[in-house]
């Protein structure tokens, strides 16, 4: 999986992360490793460009969730605790988190985000400038 | 149509492509095909990660049609496990008491119309995933 990274200076510094390819059990750790590296360099806000991601499985959902937790400075959940992680997000009264936002998820990916209920926690945009301005 | 493949997460993408082409050959509509692929990926991932636990193993996929159902059979030699009997975790339980893999099974249920399991006489697990589909050609 190729992952392109660019930096944008908005009200806060934002890293735009653009993976290319399916986000499944074989690839999700690459996205997590990228997020860990960015976090170590000081990144706290990511715009995840999903326009070149045709498919996502529960492993990819876990990567998104873990990215959000990591950038909030929270401990990462057990990698296998998918349902628990999702429930915690659903039960959270804090509403959408502000550290990871999504740009242009493709229809199949949107459907999985909606079905899992995680769409409520990731602000999602179709316009890059509007997304960047929202941070 | 049948595919025998090693139980490896690197084979999930070829497995998805196989289901897509097999379903297309049967004339199934794209939405039903995509849903079945989603469920199959989650099922195969669970077999590879939790069933075989990363050890070498075999996976057999068979795509077929019965009436208005697009069917996928997934067969493996990992220890017997019936995901259909899996109870979604009690969210009041502490996290360490919950069984892993629940999100994948939740998605399997959401993306299929039927999900049944049986232990084959040869000792293999057989998971049958069914999705109602529109078929363009009679098969």
Image (cartoon, coloured by chain):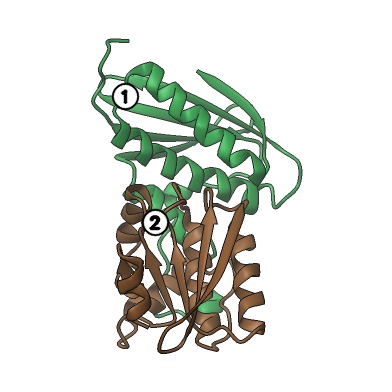
Chain colours: A brown, B green
**Disc ID at residue A113:** none
* Pointer 2 chain: B
Q: Is residue A87 above or below residue B46?
A: below
Residue A36, position in %: x, y? 64, 76
Q: Earlier in the sequence, mark 1 or mark 2?
A: 1
| Residue situated in front as seen by the camera: A42 or B4 | A42
- Kindly report which numbered mark, 1 or 2, lies closer to the viewer in this rendering: 1
Quadrant housing the C terminus of chain B? top left
Residue that label 2 marks: B106
| Residue situated in front as seen by the camera: B129 or A62 | A62
SS label for mark 1:
loop
**Disc ID at residue B28:** 1
Q: Is residue B10 above or below residue B137?
A: below
Q: Residue at x 38, y 82 (%)?
A: A97
Q: Is residue A95 above or below residue B98?
A: below
Residue B95, position in %: x, y? 51, 78
Specify the farthest residue to the right: B56
Using a 10 Å C-alpha cutoff, classify the residue at mark 2 as few (fewer than 14 neighbours), some (14 to 19) or many (20 or more). many
Labels 1 and 2 in the same subunit: yes
Using a 10 Å C-alpha cutoff, classify the residue at mark 1 as few (fewer than 14 neighbours), some (14 to 19) or many (20 or more). many
* Pointer 1 chain: B
């Amino acid at each position: 999986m190729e992952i392109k990274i660019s930096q944008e200076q908005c009200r806060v510094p934002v890293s735009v992360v653009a993976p290319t390819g399916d986000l499944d059990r074989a690839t999700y750790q690459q996205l997590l490793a990228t997020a860990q590296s960015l976090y170590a360099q000081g990144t706290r806000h990511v715009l995840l460009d999903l326009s070149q991601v045709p498919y996502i499985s529960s492993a990819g959902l876990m990567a998104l969730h873990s990215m959000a937790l990591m950038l909030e400075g929270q401990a990462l959940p057990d990698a296998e605790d998918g349902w628990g992680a999702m429930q915690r997000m659903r039960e959270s009264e804090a509403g959408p988190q502000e550290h990871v936002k999504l740009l242009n998820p493709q229809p199949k990916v949107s459907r999985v985000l909606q079905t899992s209920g995680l769409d409520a926690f990731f602000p999602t945009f179709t316009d890059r400038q509007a997304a960047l301005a929202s941070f | 149509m049948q595919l025998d493949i090693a139980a490896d997460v690197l084979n999930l993408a070829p497995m998805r492509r196989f289901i897509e082409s097999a379903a297309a050959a049967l004339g199934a509509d794209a939405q039903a095909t995509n849903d079945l692929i989603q469920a199959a990926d989650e099922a195969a991932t669970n077999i590879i990660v939790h069933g075989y636990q990363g050890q070498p193993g075999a996976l057999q996929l068979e795509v077929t049609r019965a009436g208005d159902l697009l069917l996928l059979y997934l067969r493996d030699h990992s220890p017997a496990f019936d995901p259909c009997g899996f109870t979604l975790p009690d969210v009041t339980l502490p996290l360490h008491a919950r069984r892993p893999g629940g999100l994948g099974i939740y998605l399997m249920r959401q993306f299929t119309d039927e999900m049944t399991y049986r232990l084959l006489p040869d000792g293999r697990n057989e998971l049958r995933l069914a999705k109602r589909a529109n078929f363009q050609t009679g098969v």
